[in-house]
Image: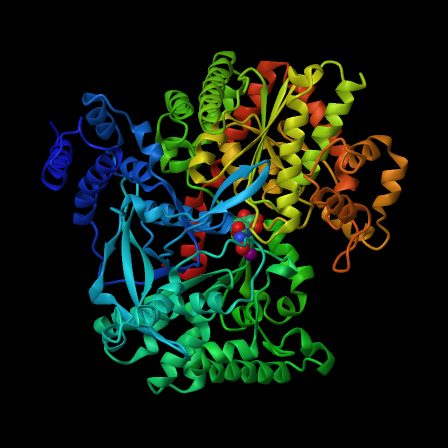
Amino acid sequence: MSAFSQDILELLRLDYGVSPEQASTVQIYDAVSRAAMAQARRRWQTPARGKRACYFSAEFLMGRMIGANLYNMGLLKECASFLAAHGLDMNMFEEIGDAALGNGGLGRLAACFLDSAATCGVPLDGYGIRYRYGLFAQTFEDGFQKEAPDDWQRFTDPWAVRREEDAVLIRFADQTVRAVPYDSPVIGCGENALVNTLRLWQAEAQRPFDFDLFNRQKYSAAVEERDRAEAISAVLYPNDDTREGKRLRLKQQYFFSAASLADLVKRYKAAHGPDLSGFAEAYAIQLNDTHPTISIPELLRLLMEEGMDFDAAFAVVCRTFAYTNHTIMAEALEKWDVNLFKSVVPQLYPYVELLENALEMELALRRVPREKKQNYRIICRGQIHMARMAIFATHSTNGVARIHTEIIKHSALPEWYALWPERFNNKTNGITQRRWLALCNPELSGLITQRIGDGWITDLDQLKRLVPYADDPATQDAFLAVKEEKKRQLAQVIRSKEGFRLDPTFLYDIQIKRLHEYKRQFMNALSILDLYYGIKEGRITDLQPTAFLFGAKAAPGYYRAKGIIKLINEIARLVDGDEAVRGLLQVVFVQNYNVSYAEKLIPAAEVSEQISTAGTEASGTSNMKFMLNGAVTLGTYDGANIEIVEAAGEENNYIFGARVEDIEKLRQSYDPKQIYQAEPRVRRVMDALVDGTLSDGSTGVFRELYDSILEGASWHRPDQYYLLLDLIPYCETRLRLNRDVRDRRAFAKKCLLNIANAGQFSSDRTIRQYAREIWSV
Ligand code: GPV
């Protein structure tokens, strides 16, 4: 028996007094994880020498850790055979919840980056918040979303170590709290692998309760200080791509920024002595969006309180920080009310003013005319513009896909690009192939490795060697057999989780991502209605039966997003209840879509829905995961879709709809009502929202959705995301796809060419670019 297996047995016996046969799932999970941790810890020391990069992020959407860690350590097979020897298997860990300390793409990107950096030998540590409750758990009741707290720590947290000795105090106007770090090893895969660190801060009170109050029997008052401290790291804000100007959110941002910087300064001094002028040569800090941008005035404060003058301190700040922008949508750009800011972290405000003054000087020096200065001001109309601060006080601002970076430079922030063109650069996002192929799709991995070897696991460009196999009928058939198997597996998961029977012979067409108007799940819903009526009216006669799968969480306060969930659930019910279409269409909205669910859905997909309005999705990353698993993209010219079809060939994907330039030209004159009146198919599907075909349970939300398209609202024009403009081209492109898939081998060829050209979308590539071009590590 291997040492690893022996460790597991011993941990079960000593800690729980059980044999594997007697142990509960959580006990086995705990023992396996801790046996692996013991091995990882031997390789887990921070080298004293050399520059390190730090990824500051309010979110790390890690998902389930056990599989990925065992995989990267080369222990997965051993674990599986240990379990098999006791009549168990790896599927038992499906019970263990995800570490969902993130909302969506931005948080999952951070997790992929950690995996890639550790694998590629890049010294990169993650810094964030150890939320007590992660992203809410979602269920549907009568088709409406219900939220429940996500108590992810109830399973124990064997992958983290509490580091009491590194706790620091964080000062706010109305309270001072302890920040206690919990460290997890980030275990790379392969020869160059490092074990880096994810350090998440937990907020605690300086003292557990007030003894005097306790003695006077004032129990709730006695623990009030503790509750107020713990509130800071209690819950992840469930908004994605929108900001919420809440006091507690600002506290969270300062909490983890200040704790992380205190930590780095302490380490720097331990290694280099008290003079901080070389700080930027020791640490590069990447700001994941503006959420940690409050780090900028905080580091300035720390440096100046050590006696540095502003110019010297500002130079260190600029050389240390770099900023990644993840959206150009106005509602997501963070601004903080000056008064709120001052009432939370008054000690920082003078440093914000110093930044503002420095900016003012710079603008004067560069002779920016007075009327143009409004576009630059960090402090403007009683608000602090965090993105402006981030661009001004860093040496690098990057977008996350080519088109996104171009939009930043030329239409979102052209005045900034004009002054500091050298700061702007692109780093197209990527995904880790360890989780998103090797781990979630061992069947396809096996096929690929059988053809080209296993070098792709740490060098995804090797997938190019699959190109010749795209024409090989045996490989095409083997691919189709794998896809069928993954569809069967998914159908089983859906049956047990949702109680819904999916037919694995149907085409699987999947849209999974946060619910947002700009991502246009609503347009997908309308297109399904068009199919439905097309079949009913005899316009569509030879459809390859298709299952439309959705997964999405809506921010709890996002009324329309919740209406769209209800709408899709009602369409599912309509289709299911109709004998005439049931054999041709299925619609399923899965509950509680998360990283682990994605690992089941993506390998089974044949069609990847990426249909955001051109110019709105900064990059997208699920598009890359689908591509890697051999789905074709049905999508718009937006975000990384553009680079995907450029790499894999437009002829192997299905692109439709208005482009950014088209929309720019149209913007002023766009009239969705005209399309509604001119096109009976559009009218038919829109009317279904309000003519009694579909019921919203008398909430009025379907009428509101209808009006959002045809009437607009005080805060936006009608159909601001151009659903009606793209709807018919979308439906027609999907029908063309549907006809194409009937030639199974021709379709398999397209899928294989997508896989073969997915190499550049590895986050290994992305992280190497950050390391070389921004961090110099
Ligand atoms: I800002 N993104 C996100 O998930 N949450 C946010 O708050 C913001 C951006 C996403 C973008 O929407 C995606 O297009 C992108 O792929 C992802 O960030 C990672 O860059």
Left or right of residue 246: residue 277: left
Left or right of residue 308: residue 144: right
| Residue 279 % position (x, y) | 34, 73
| Residue 105 % position (x, y) | 51, 47
Q: Residue at x 36, y 79 (%)?
A: 302
User: From this viewpoint, is residue 459 visible?
Assistant: no
Give the number of marks: 0
| Residue 775 % position (x, y) | 41, 61
User: From this viewpoint, is residue 238 visible?
Assistant: yes
> Which image quarter holds the N terminus?
top left
Left or right of residue 184: residue 719: right
Q: Which quadrant would residue 750 be assigned to in this image?
A: top right
Q: Residue at x 46, y 40 (%)?
A: 594
Q: Is residue 567 above or below residue 199?
A: above
Residue in front for this viewpoint, 540 or 147: 147
Q: Is residue 513 above or below residue 475?
A: below
Q: Residue at x 59, y 63 (%)?
A: 333
Q: Which quadrant would residue 543 be assigned to in this image?
A: top right
Q: Is residue 393 above or below residue 618?
A: below
Left or right of residue 195: residue 234: right
Residue in front for this viewpoint, 745 or 483: 483
| Residue 107 % position (x, y) | 46, 51
Residue in front for this viewpoint, 748 or 725: 725
